[in-house]
Image (cartoon, helix red, strand yellow):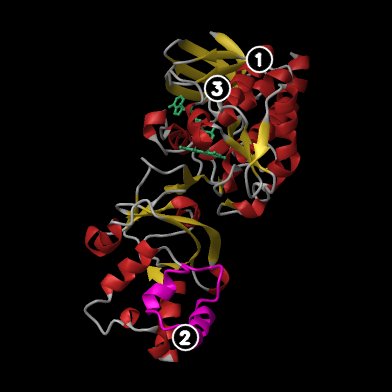
Amino acid sequence: MEQFDVVIVGAGAAGLFCAALTGQRGLKVLLIDHNTKVAEKIRISGGGRCNFSNLDTSPANYLSNNPNFCRSALSRFTPRHFTDLLQQHGIGFHEKHKGQLFCDRSAEDVIGMLLTDCVAAGVTRWQPCRVTGILSGSDTATGSSRYEIACDRGHVQSRALVIATGGLSIPKSGATDFGYRMARQFGLRLVEPRPALVPLTFDSGSWAPYANLAGLSLPVQIAVGERRKKITFLEDLLFTHRGLSGPAVLQISSYWRAGQPIRINLAPDIDLLQTLTQAKIHSRKLIANELARQLPTRLVDVWIQQDSAADNPWQRPINEASDKALARLAERLSRWELTPTGSEGYGKAEVTAGGVDTRDLSSQTLESSQAGLYFIGEVVDVTGWLGGYNFQWAWASAHACAEGLATKLQPARQID
Ligand code: FDA
């Protein structure tokens, strides 16, 4: 049976990077992936240009039951470390907005770099190759951990096993629940996985008035939760046929829980009440027309139509409106509250929140409470905001793991 120091399952962002770094540290590495295509999520990310990191990365940009867990890995491998690597490989990149870093040319450049580094570090890659079973034991002489991995190409043995199989999002890209099954097999706890960075949906009846707005986009402030637990984002909102999407909704979806309302300020850049009160002094236009100066006309039209049965304030000249009526309108538009009935699910989610419980992992090395078993990347209960934070976690956790493997396995190797 062929022997390796480390077997890594999952040749996505975290697995490829970890394999290259571990190989560079002198360990014998086997990387296994069941997919025919390599690193499919890197390829489709950032509209094909891969938003590979974010200059403003900090633990505050991540969700986890333990918000401090990601701190150690992120501080030891920063966005700058990754951009240095890209520069060494002659790969051009640029900042788009809000610190988001993209490839100048194509996401393929990042994949090419990771593959080149794996080859240079002597990593063996078996792909496509299906893992059919994993057994753990210990070396009778040293007492150190041993893993036996059964796969399509035979059985191999390793001293450490790294699970880098990601989350459940986009099943057609090769996503599976393998990582969660492994965690359960070895008695580790899981934080219930759920789709995140995902469009939110509404029941077709209540959404009918807005369905025709599909394609309309506008900057909003969006919020979920109350008081100290309130989360807000200032981003673009996109109307869809089934509900809401765009960066604002993707961001808030990671925090949203079933049954909770979300609140949207449709005119976040102005004080709407003050604007309407000022207009009342100078203008005789209909309120709807005054509003159309601040908001997309299509959106104003939909709000007007909805009020047609009631005493419709929108169709009144603004100079005839009472201050109370204007205050009510401003309040409605700046605190539009609505309760999604669900999300578009794993088929459309960019990531999976939840995952392997960080209480069972070392924040220094990503080794689990099962000796020699490591979890890195999205499979861990660490989920980044939209904007390059998830790849930065993949790189940083892979780096922490590679360092941990080198420290743990290299001295023993010399004794061998
Ligand atoms: P990743 O999913 O990359 O890799 C897991 C690997 O494991 C895959 O190669 C898979 O085939 C393999 N695997 C799964 N099950 C297996 C099994 N049973 N046996 C063997 N192999 C198995 N993030 C970001 O920061 N910036 C961005 O621009 C984007 N854009 C984006 C767009 C879209 C459409 C999606 C779906 C996602 C993003 N993301 C993103 C998120 C980002 O892609 C994601 O967080 C990382 O790829 C996670 O890296 P991992 O290596 O953990 O998993």
Is residue 279 visible in the rendered structure shown here? yes
> Percent x, y for residue 388?
59, 42
The answer to whether 199 is drawn above or below residue 222 in the figure is: above
What residue does disc 1 label? 28
Answer above or below: position of 20 versus 298: above
Does the segment drawn in magenta span residue 355?
no
Q: Amino acid at mark 3?
A: Tyr
Q: CA distance from mark 3 to mark 2?
A: 75 Å
For the point 45% across and 49% down, which residue is it?
196
Classify mark 3: helix, strand or loop: strand
Crowdedness near tag 3: few (<14), some (14–19) or many (≥20) residues, C-alpha within 10 Å: many
User: Mark number for residue 147?
Assistant: 3
Give the secondary structure at mark 1: loop
Q: Which residue is mark 2?
A: 280
Q: Amino acid at mark 2?
A: Lys
Residue 77 seen in render: no
Range of residues picked out in magenta? 265-294
The C terminus: image quadrant: top right
Asked whether 269 falls inside the magenta stretch, the response is: yes
Label whose residue precedes the other's in the sequence (3 or 2): 3
Which dot, 2 or 1, sits closer to the camera? 2
